[in-house]
Amino acid sequence: MTDTLTIHARLAARVDAALDALVDGGMLPTGLDRRNVSVEPPRDPSHGDLATNAAMVLAKPAGTNPRALAEAIADRLRAEDGVAGVEIAGPGFLNLRLDRSMWLGELAAIEALGDNYGRSAMGGGKRVNVEYVSANPTGPMHMGHCRGAVVGDALASLLEYAGHNVTREYYVNDAGGQVDVLARSAHLRYREALGEDVGTIPEGLYPGSYLQPVGMALAKEFGDRYADEPESEWLEIFRTASVAAMMEVIRQDLASLGIHHETFASEAELQAAGKPAEAEAKLREAGLVYDGILEAPKSKTLDDWEPVELPLFRSTQFGDDQDRPIRKSDGKWTYFGADLAYHMQKAESADALIDIWGADHSGTVKRIKAAVAALAQMEGREVPFDVKLVQMVQLLRDGEPVKMSKRSGNFVTLAEVVEEVGKDVVRFTMLTRKPEAQMDFDFAKVVEASKDNPVFYVQYAHARIHSTLRKGEEAGVRPDSAAIDRLGEDEIALVKQAAQFPRIVEQAAKAREAHRIAFFLGDLAAAFHAFWNAGNDDPEKRIIVAQDDALTAARLYLADQIGQVFRNGLAILGVQAVEEL
């Protein structure tokens, strides 16, 4: 039976077994915390294949010398099959060199695990709520929302792959003044649909033509019933209908990008259910909300500022620069007041929260984190809360800024971009840089068939593998592991690169950074293309070798497993692994 543990998991288990033996032998005490013991490639590949910090981490709590502990661990590991050598570096790091049979065995693990290669149980079923996009329901999705949407969706998939129980959530901001503006804008389009010449859209209303279908639907449903009625008669009706219509558009836009949320939480429903008042009561009970007067804003004079007593959250206790109001002077909830109640609601059914926000919201991170920490603490539990800030994307066409859209009038819609370049190009491109870094999206460059285009470079590697497998089949040779012992150092180097995938998955999940998967795939593509190109200079290094079916079958087997790793990584990112370009 094939051992389906990946090479890093196997070596970690062997290190663990060595430590168990030392506990049994009395050199290490029982109950040592081993969570910080790592088994990973050394920074300098010349030092070996894998390294462990076990001796460095455990020596102090064990009351022993790290070098002596390293010697004891090394003696145990040297006796393990597949371990070609163990060296002690510095004060106690262990560098391991593995026999080539271990790396060839990794190909068998990839084959056996297939789509599950790299999948981890690290998350232990922990419930994680990932909230992303959450754009105001006042129009179609635009490219300002795109990056956060992709980052959030890829992160959710990554966490699922790493063993978490993930809820994808969208917070519908349907209780603020912006949805009243939406209703008034829809009413204007409603009158237009009835035949009225509305002229230029007044300042302050949404001008995009995307509201024309909403106006037509309202005209069909109500006729001219609300054409001349006062706003009080139709505002709530038109607001509800307009938000529903816009959310349907948003769902369709997100679907075009392969994004589907399980939960859509309504701010209006949250307030109707009394959640903000409930949060306020809990925080008052804990002494974290009090009635006070804010300092006058520096931008106002005493003549145009009136001191008003407001309920304030003690966010300064949690690192904020001032306490924050949770209600306005008219009694309505502030954005902060509604948001802390919303996060309290999410925390009721989650073990951890992750929000994907635009970088322009960075100023609110501290206070929301403080509120969540306070509410969780009062319930006697800890709910880790992470906020990922995403920078805007600058749209370019051949280096020139793109600003206008036929549909919206003042921004480029997500649907227009996906229609032009395709879902996969958009998704992968959004993950080719860290979310907090600025990004340019040039329509010409993202579809360029060049090694400088990371989307093409990775897709081309997988397409090359598929093409090679097809040519091998046409020549009557299929992938076969019977002769993999004939694979040389170049092939082993490629296996070593691919074998990083399970470790990268766990590291990326721990760091909440899905872009690490895209970076890994870029490195793997570079390694595969280099391996392929070596055959252009030396026919003996080609995957399909004339008159040597056994070696060809072994190299096809290697290529097939590398292709599996590409497919698994791209699946996490929500990108299809194409078979031809």
Image (cartoon, grey):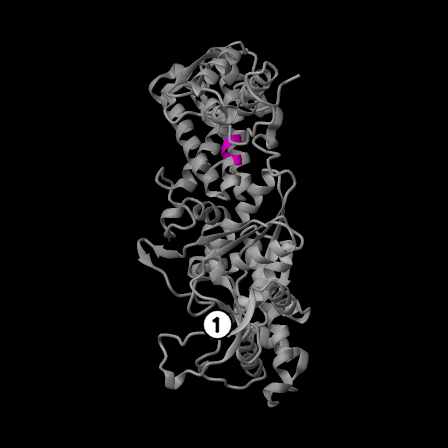
Label 1 CA crowd tier, 10 Å (few <14, some 14–19, many 20+)? some
Residue furthest to the left in view is 399
Query: Which is more toward the observer, 435 or 255?
Result: 435
Residue furthest to the top in view is 79
- Residue pictured at 65% horizontal, 53% vertical: 262
- Residue pictured at 39% horizontal, 31% vertical: 526
Q: Which quadrant would residue 89 be assigned to in this image?
A: top left
- Residue pictured at 56% horizontal, 77% vertical: 180
Say what secondary structure mark 1 lies in.
loop
Main SS, magenta residues: helix
| Amino acid at dot 1 | Gly
Q: Which quadrant would residue 116 be assigned to in this image?
A: top right
Q: Is residue 305 left or right of residue 573?
A: left
For residue 316, above or below residue 439: below
Does the stretch in magenta take in 463? no
Residue 108 spot, x, y in % from top left = 58, 20
Magenta residues, start to end: 502-506
Query: Which is more toward the observer, 432 or 558?
Result: 432
Residue 194 spot, x, y in % from top left = 59, 83
Residue 175 appears anywhere in the view: yes
For residue 573, above or below residue 215: above
Q: Which quadrant would residue 231 be assigned to in this image?
A: bottom right
Residue annotated with mark 1: 208
For residue 459, above or below residue 554: below
Residue 576 appears anywhere in the view: no
Residue 70 spot, x, y in % from top left = 46, 17
Query: Which is more toward the observer, 435 or 562?
Result: 435
